[in-house]
Amino acid sequence: MDGEKLKVAFFDTKPYDRKSFTEQNRDFGLELVFYESRLTAASAAMAEGAQVVCAFVNDELDRAAIDRLVAGGVKLIAMRCAGYNNVDLPAAYGRIEVVRVPAYSPHAVAEYTLALMLCLNRGLNRAYCRVRENNFSINGLLGFDVHGKTIGIVGTGKIGKVFAELLQGFGVRLLAYDLYPDREAAEKLHLEYVPLTTLYRESDVISLHCPLTPENLHLINRESLSQMKDGVMILNTSRGKLIDTAGLIEALKSGKVGSAGLDVYEEETDYFFEDRSDAPIQDDVLARLLTFPNVMITSHQAFFTREAMRNIARVTLQNIVDFTRGELPNGICSQCEGGKCRHCRKKR
Ligand code: NAI
C-alpha cells in the first residue's frame, strides 16, 4: 500500500464522529468515507474498495460479516473504542487484522460513573424535572451520605483505578475484585482486594469496570444479586451483557437493589445512539427498566468528552498508519485477552 492513499470506510457514524475524524485527519491524509449504517454481514459489502473499516461498539463483526469484509479485500478492522467483545476474533485470526484504542480517556468514563452515582443517589435528574414543572416537593428524593460507605469496584484496570482515585476524597472504604489484582494500586489507592462474594456481601455500591468476556457474561445475575446487601446501588458503565437485566428487574421490584445507574444495556444495539422518540419501544425489558424511578439509564455516553473524542480519532488514525508501515502496536487477537501476547504485538 506504499504511497497510495488508503481508503477507510467508517460505519455507524454520527455527525460528531465525522467532525472529529475529519479534523484530526488533517495530520494523517487518509481517504475517509463515512456511513451511517451499522456494520453487519448485510452492510459489509459497502466497504468494498476500502482497505480498512472503522467500527464502533454496536457494529456486529461476527463471522459472516468478517467473511464479507475479507472477500471484499479489507485488510484491517480499526475499532474506534476500547472494548472488542463485538468482534469474532477467532474468525478474524490470520485473515484480517484488528486494532483498537486501548485507552483514550479513562477519566471520561470514571468521572461519568461518579456523576451517575451522585446524581442517582440524590435524585438530581428527578429534582430537575420536578422544579421545571413548579413542583418543589422533595418527597422521595432521600439519598444517603457517600461518606462512610463501602464501594466495590469490579475490574481495576485503567478506568476502575481512576474511579478509585476520584473516590479518595469521599471517606469511603474501597473493595476491589480483579482477575489480576494490582498490588501497587491497592497500596496507593487504599483498595482492599477481596473475593467477589465478599465484595457482593459488603458493598453499598458496586461499580463494574471489567470488559465483557465469555466468562463474565451475566456476572450480575439472580444468584450474585441474592448475595448483595439489601438496597445496594449498581453502576454499569462497562458493557450491558455483564448484567442479566431480567434478574436486575426482579431485584429492583423486590427492593433488593436500591438503585441502578446504567450507561449500557445488554440489548442496546437497536436503541442507543438513536432518536427513537417517535415510536413505541418494542423491547419490553428496556421499557420496564425505564419505568423505575430509581434507575437512571443513559445511552452509552460515558466516553463522550472532547478530550476522549480527539484521542479516539488520533489513535485510530495512527493505528491505521502504523498498519500500513507493518506495525500493529494496538493489535488484538484471539490468542490472549487482548494486547498482551506476541500475536497482538507482532510485526506483520
Ligand atoms: P482495562 O483493560 O484497563 O481494565 C479492565 C480490567 O478488568 C483489567 O484489570 C482486567 O484484569 C479486569 N478483568 C477482566 N475480566 C475480569 C473479570 N471477569 N472480573 C474482574 N475483573 C476482570 O480496561 P478499561 O480501559 O478500564 O475499560 C474497562 C471497560 O470499560 C472496557 O472493557 C469497556 O467495556 C468499558 N468502557 C465503556 C465505555 C463507555 O462509554 N461506557 C468507554 C470505554 C470503556
Image (tube, rainbow, N blue to C red):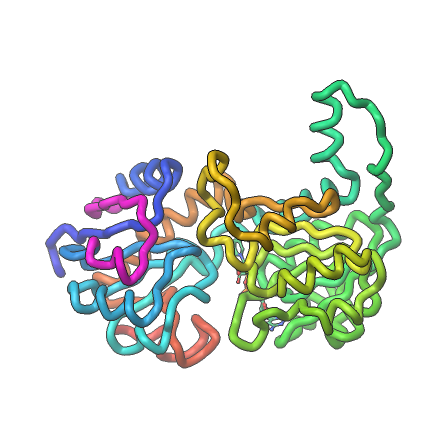
**What's the residue at 32%, 75% (across, down)?**
91
Report the span colored magenta: 27-46
Q: Quadrant of residue 251?
A: bottom right
Residue 47 part of the magenta segment = no
**What's the residue at 84%, 51% (across, down)?**
171
> Looking at the picture, how far across and down is residue 116, in whole percent?
68, 45
Residue 41 part of the magenta segment = yes
Tally the numbered discs. Answer: 0
Q: Quadrant of residue 47?
A: bottom left
> Looking at the picture, how far across and down is residue 153, in whole percent?
70, 62
Q: Is residue 321 visible?
A: no
Q: Is residue 220 above or below residue 235?
A: below
> Looking at the picture, how far across and down is residue 17, in whole percent?
37, 41
Ligand 1 visible in quadrant? bottom right
Question: Is residue 103 left or right of 180 when viewed as pictured?
Answer: left
Q: Nearer the viewer, residue 205 or 245?
A: 245
Mostly what secondary structure, the magenta segment?
loop
Question: Is residue 178 left or right of 21 when viewed as pictured?
Answer: right
Q: Nearer the viewer, residue 270 or 24?
A: 270
Q: Is residue 116 above or below residue 338?
A: above
> Looking at the picture, how far across and down is residue 23, in whole percent?
32, 37
**What's the residue at 42%, 43% (across, down)?**
310
Q: Nearer the viewer, residue 109 or 273?
A: 273
Q: Is residue 74 visible?
A: yes
On-image quarter of the C terminus: bottom left
